[in-house]
């Protein structure tokens, strides 16, 4: 009986570690930032601002090093957030309409 238990345990252990797991590290995120002073803006080619600083620090702590796309075209950013998967934006206003559309973090 002990031998069967050991074999079953070893098989279960091997299956557990050999299963591929979904990448939930956030490395597949596409990150956007709207030009909206003082929250986020470009200065000498670098993204600056209150919200951007917090977002960039969170990315650094999570070891996320993908580029942040900054744009003044909010309509395009908002359209991508609604239609594409794994999209994130640093700054947007929480409204009754948007509350159920997205996952939220904040406020800053």
Image (cartoon, rainbow, N blue to C red):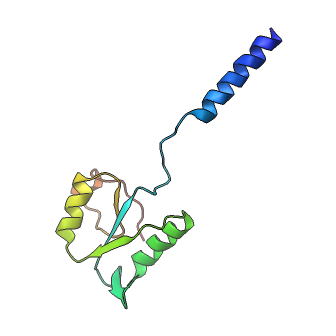
Q: Which quadrant holds the C terminus?
A: bottom left
Is 68 left or right of 73, judged from the image as shown? right
Residue 83 screen position, x and y as percent:
22, 52
Residue 89 screen position, x and y as percent:
33, 65
Does 53 sit above or below residue 24? below
Question: Residue extending furthest top?
Answer: 1
Question: Residue extending furthest bottom?
Answer: 44
Question: Residue extending furthest left?
Answer: 75
Q: Which quadrant holds the N terminus?
A: top right
Does 38 sit above or below residue 83? below
Out of 92 and 31, give the one closest to the viewer: 31
Does 5 sit above or below residue 37? above
Examine the rendering and report whether any part of residue 96 can be seen. no
Write the residue at 22% across / 63% down.
78
Write the residue at 48% across / 47% down.
23
Write the residue at 48% across / 49% down.
24
Out of 32 and 97, give the one closest to the viewer: 32
Out of 44 and 82, give the one closest to the viewer: 44
Residue 37 screen position, x and y as percent:
31, 84
Is 82 left or right of 7, judged from the image as shown? left
Is 64 left or right of 73, judged from the image as shown? right
Out of 106 and 48, give the one closest to the viewer: 48
Q: Count numbered badges in the picture.
A: 0
Residue 72 screen position, x and y as percent:
22, 77
Write the residue at 53% across / 69% down.
60
Examine the rendering and report whether any part of residue 18 can be seen. yes
């Amino acid at each position: 009986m002990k031998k069967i238990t050991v074999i079953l345990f070893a098989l279960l252990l091997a299956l557990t570690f050999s299963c591929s797991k979904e990448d939930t590290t956030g490395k597949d995120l596409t990150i956007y930032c709207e030009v909206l002073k003082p929250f986020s803006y470009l200065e000498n080619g670098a993204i600056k601002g209150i919200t951007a600083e917090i977002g960039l620090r969170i990315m650094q702590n999570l070891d996320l090093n993908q580029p942040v796309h900054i744009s003044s075209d909010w309509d395009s950013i908002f359209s991508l957030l609604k239609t594409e998967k794994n999209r994130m934006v640093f700054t947007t206003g929480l409204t009754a309409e948007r509350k159920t559309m997205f996952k939220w973090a904040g406020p800053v």
